[in-house]
Amino acid sequence: MKPTDFAYHLSRYFTTYMPGVLGLSTKTISSYQDAFYIFLRYCKMKRKIEPEKITLKMLDLELVTDFLQSLEEDGNSISTRNQRLTALRSFFKYIQLVEPKYIYLMQQLLAIKHKKCKKASVNYLTVDGIKLLLKQPDSSSRTGYRDLLILSVLYESGSRVDELINIKVGDIRLDNPATILLHGKGNKSRIVPLSQEMAELIKIYLRNEKLESFERSSRLLFLNRSGNKLTGAGIAYIIQKYANTARTINPTVITSGLSPHCIRHSKAMHLLQAGVDLIYIRDFLGHESIKTTEIYAKVDSSAKRKALENAYKTLPLNADDLSLQGDWHDSSNLMDWLRATCR
């Protein structure tokens, strides 16, 4: 069966354009592939259109808007709906470049707007909450010490969970000044400083795990009990496990729904409260824009209070002083191909 123009361009888009021209990471590509898999499943199950028969001409406004609406009807959040649309829009922009005859159709689709949604609140722990959480692992056991180190590195480095599970032994520098190399979004890396206390904790861990030799530098720093790579779900389980025990001791300082990203938020808030400039916090967290980092200043009531107090100090106390002046070519099943590449 000869592939359709949609199948041909979708294959070229994922295998050539995204990695080669846009230089996107495998994680981003996988996320977009997942969005298209869901779109193709919708076409097959709800529209009775076999994926192998979809053509570019079929990508009209009604099809795409109905798909987005079905996402919400199936219980997906507005944020998820917008993420799926972002993936589709990227492909529509690509088609404009390679198939100019469809430029009007693609521009109609690109006119579909993202829905406004409530911004998620920043959930974070106080310094006392972090201290209590770090007291929970049994550091006398091998697993407990590993868990303590996971929680400690997650907080001290402000790393994302994906960055944490991909840390290799060779990414750690224990000589003064101690640092850790994190591999972030979009294949971007950054070096984060570590305290000497943290360096000592890591040194003990490397010695106990026999990871001090140069030959072990390419091994992942943290593994699960089976000796395999940890997952985001695994890290979340570890955090929740110790959060539950900490909550029995002091429920007021351990928030509910504690996640790996909450630990990252906590580090950012503590840096802000310690007077660290947002520019440095941005670089520390690996944010692309300062606007992303500004959310911490917006939610920090103590910072707002200090700013107001400083503002009042500059106000004139005498009313007289006030101024009045104012390659998929040979495949016949697009669903199988996407499902395979999403693994």
Image (cartoon, rainbow, N blue to C red):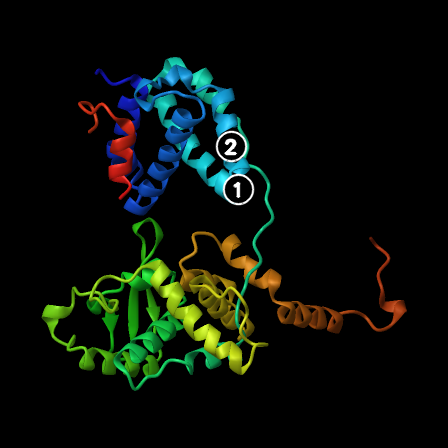
Name which residue type carries label 1: Gly
Q: Which residue is mark 1?
A: 75
> How far, Cα to Cα, is label 2 from label 1?
9 Å
- Residue at position x 85%, y 68% in the image: 321
Q: Which residue is mark 2?
A: 70
Name which residue type carries label 2: Ser
Q: Is residue 92 visible?
A: no
Q: Quadrant of the N terminus?
A: top left
Q: Residues within 10 Å of mark 1 (few under 14, many from 20)?
A: few
Most extreme residue toward the left is: 215
- Residue at position x 44%, y 69% in the image: 240
Q: Is residue 28 visible?
A: yes
On the image, the x and y values in percent for residue 183 come to 30, 58
Q: Which mark is residue 33?
A: none
On the image, the x and y values in percent for residue 217 come to 16, 68
Most extreme residue toward the right is: 320
Does residue 81 appear left or right of residue 204 in this picture?
Answer: right
Q: Quadrant of the C terminus?
A: top left
Count of all numbered marks drawn on residues in the image: 2
- Residue nearer the viewer, 235 or 307: 235
Does residue 322 appear left or right of residue 340 in this picture?
Answer: right
Position of residue 203 relative to residue 78, above or below, is below
Most extreme residue toward the bottom is: 140
- Residue at position x 29%, y 30% in the image: 335
- Residue at position x 84%, y 54% in the image: 325
- Residue nearer the viewer, 231 or 23: 231
Element at label 2? helix
Element at label 1? loop
* Sequence-earlier tag: 2 or 1: 2
On the image, the x and y values in percent for residue 14 come to 28, 33
Place residue 275 in its image quadrant.
bottom right
